[in-house]
Amino acid sequence: MMTAYILVSLLLAVQPTAPPKQAVVETAAGTFIIDLDPEAAPNQVAYFMKLAQQGAYDGTTFHRVVK
């Protein structure tokens, strides 16, 4: 009985994780993926995704490149 209780408790404690939010960026130099972290920056991720879905970044250039 105790084993069943522990097993059920462990199963209930495991929460499925949501798939990571990602942005796929296509450039003339190639394609890359940006991992977004809505837990760390929920407002910024939501705003970035809104702008991306509206096409705000289409045809723009990078203003800063770090090597």
Image (cartoon, rainbow, N blue to C red):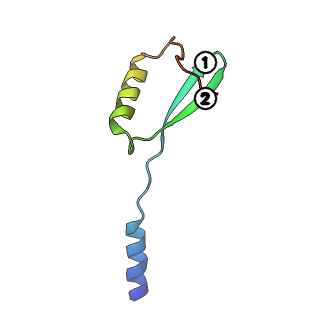
User: How far is the residue under mark 1 from the one under mark 2?
Assistant: 8 Å
Number of residues whose C-alpha sits closer than 10 Å to that of mark 2, classed few (under 14), some (14–19) or many (20 or more): few
**Identity of the residue drawn at 40% across and 27% down:** 48
Rendered location of residue 27, percent (x, y)? 60, 18
Of the numbered discs in the image, which one, if any, rests on residue 27? 1
Q: For the residue marked with disc 2, what is the amino acid?
A: Phe
Q: What residue do we see at 53% from left, 33% from top?
A: 34
Q: Residue 16: x percent and y percent? A: 43, 56
Callout 1 amino acid: Thr
Asked which quadrant contains residue 3, the reply is: bottom left
* Position of 57 relative to 4 (above/below): above
Q: Please, which residue is most extreme toward the bottom here?
A: 1
Picture quadrant where residue 33 is located: top right
Mark 1 lies on a secondary structure that is: strand
- The numbered dot on residue 6 is none
Which residue sits furthest right?
Answer: 29
Q: Would you say the residues marked 1 and 2 are in contact, meaning their CB atoms lie under 8 Å apart?
A: yes
> At which x and y percent is residue 7?
43, 77
| Residue receiving disc 2 | 32
Q: Residues within 10 Å of mark 1 (few under 14, many from 20)?
A: few
Going 38% across and 21% down the picture, which residue do you hit? 51
Q: Position of residue 50 (x, y in %)?
A: 36, 25
Q: Residue at x 50, y 12 (%)?
A: 60
**Quadrant containing the N terminus in the rendered view:** bottom left
Q: Which one is earlier in the sequence, the residue at label 1 or at label 2?
A: 1
Relative to 11, say whether 23 is above or below.
above
Considering the numbered disc 2 on the image, is that residue within a helix, a strand or a loop?
strand
Residue at the top extreme of this rendering: 59
Q: Is residue 2 above or below residue 27?
A: below
